[in-house]
């Protein structure tokens, strides 16, 4: 499962994307406003002509979803629903109400797209190095995280990036594969346990399951290799184990999968948040 390469951007692209984002509410609510004017003035025109604004806004939103590294299926399929307005005739009042509701839905989807699926064409290659304290931690754990195969290192990248993007099913598969590869090579280190912990948490999140009574943790002997100190209490220990496991997986990927570093840099903010939480 390859990590998608974000598309490069520049200032001109950023301005173009911003205008396209503004066009979504302008076109959709503009069409609804046109419909209201036609209705109030009793103009002898098919009310469905005002639906063109919503149709155009749907296509703009779908395009904005398409150019993002992570695709929003809901936003991508909005053009399909816009044609329902044309296929199903209705009285002027019902048409206007539907247009207003659809315009509001498109605007909400636009906001969701911006804050859940990142910026279009974000240029992650502009970042070259890790920031502290993450950089220091990755250096300190280079020994325990070194020596793994490129294949396992790539699975580590997938596990971290997919978890950071809330793609928990993919994160569980990648971390599970990495753990199996580590055990097959006879490596039962702290890093192997980290992969297992990430897999356990990813599976629970993917299925929306509560915290189990018993869960995987690190042994006391691994304390010096962990970014965060051990916590007391099941709840705190449960989440601290996940944070430490994700950071170890990040270190393994960074120290062994140089081609994947641009993708890891894109998730650096998430890793730094884990260290500070």
Image (cartoon, rainbow, N blue to C red):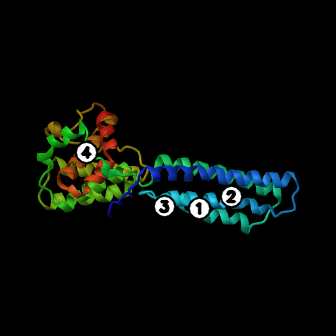
Report the label total. Answer: 4
Label 1 or label 4, whichever lies nearer to me, is 1
Q: Secondary structure at mark 1?
A: helix
Q: Dot 3 corresponds to which residue?
A: 66
Characterize the local packing of mark 2: few (<14), some (14-19) or many (20 or more) Cα atoms within 10 angstroms: many
Q: Dot 2 corresponds to which residue?
A: 53
Distance from Cα at disc 1 to Cα at disc 4: 41 Å
Sequence-earlier tag: 2 or 1: 2
Distance from Cα at disc 1 to Cα at disc 3: 10 Å
> Which residue is nearer to you in this view: 111 or 222?
111
Q: Dot 1 corresponds to which residue?
A: 59
Sequence-earlier tag: 1 or 4: 1
Q: Point out residue 261 in the picture as x, y percentages from the top left corner.
A: 25, 53
Q: Secondary structure at mark 4?
A: helix
- The residue at the point 48 percent across, 46 percent down is 115
Q: Secondary structure at mark 2?
A: helix
> Which residue is nearer to you in this view: 12 or 28?
12
The single residue placed furthest to the top in the displayed view is 232
The single residue placed furthest to the bottom in the displayed view is 87
Characterize the local packing of mark 3: few (<14), some (14-19) or many (20 or more) Cα atoms within 10 angstroms: some
Q: Point out residue 13 in the picture as x, y percentages from the top left corner.
A: 46, 53
Q: Dot 4 corresponds to which residue?
A: 245
Q: Is residue 118 visible?
A: no
| Residue 43, disc | none
Mark 2–mark 1 CB contact (< 8 Å): no
Mark 3–mark 4 CB contact (< 8 Å): no
């Amino acid at each position: 499962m390859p990590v998608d390469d974000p598309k490069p951007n520049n200032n001109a692209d950023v301005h173009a994307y911003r205008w396209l984002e503004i066009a979504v509410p302008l076109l959709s609510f503009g069409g609804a406003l046109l419909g209201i004017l036609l209705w109030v003035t009793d103009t002898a025109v098919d009310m469905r002509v005002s639906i063109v604004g919503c149709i155009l806004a749907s296509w703009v939103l779908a395009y904005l979803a398409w150019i993002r590294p992570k695709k929003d299926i809901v936003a991508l399929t909005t053009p399909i629903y816009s044609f329902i307005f044309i296929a199903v005739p209705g009285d002027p009042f019902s048409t206007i109400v539907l247009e207003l509701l659809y315009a509001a839905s498109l605007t909400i989807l636009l906001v969701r797209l911006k804050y859940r699926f990142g910026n279009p064409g974000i240029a992650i290659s502009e970042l070259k190095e890790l920031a502290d304290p993450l950089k220091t931690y990755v250096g300190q754990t280079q020994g325990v995280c070194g020596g793994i195969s490129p294949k396992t290192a790539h699975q580590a990248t997938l596990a971290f990036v997919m978890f950071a993007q809330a793609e928990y099913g993919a994160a569980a598969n990648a971390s599970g594969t990495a753990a199996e590869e580590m055990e097959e090579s006879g490596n039962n280190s702290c890093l192997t346990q980290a992969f297992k912990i990430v897999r356990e948490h990813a599976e629970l999140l993917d299925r929306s399951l509560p915290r189990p009574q018993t869960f995987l943790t690190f042994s006391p002997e691994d304390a010096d290799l962990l970014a965060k100190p051990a916590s007391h209490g099941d709840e705190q220990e449960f989440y601290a184990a996940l944070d430490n496991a994700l950071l170890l997986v990040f270190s393994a990927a960074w120290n062994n999968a140089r081609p994947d570093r641009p993708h890891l840099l894109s998730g650096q903010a998430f890793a730094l948040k884990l260290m500070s939480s």
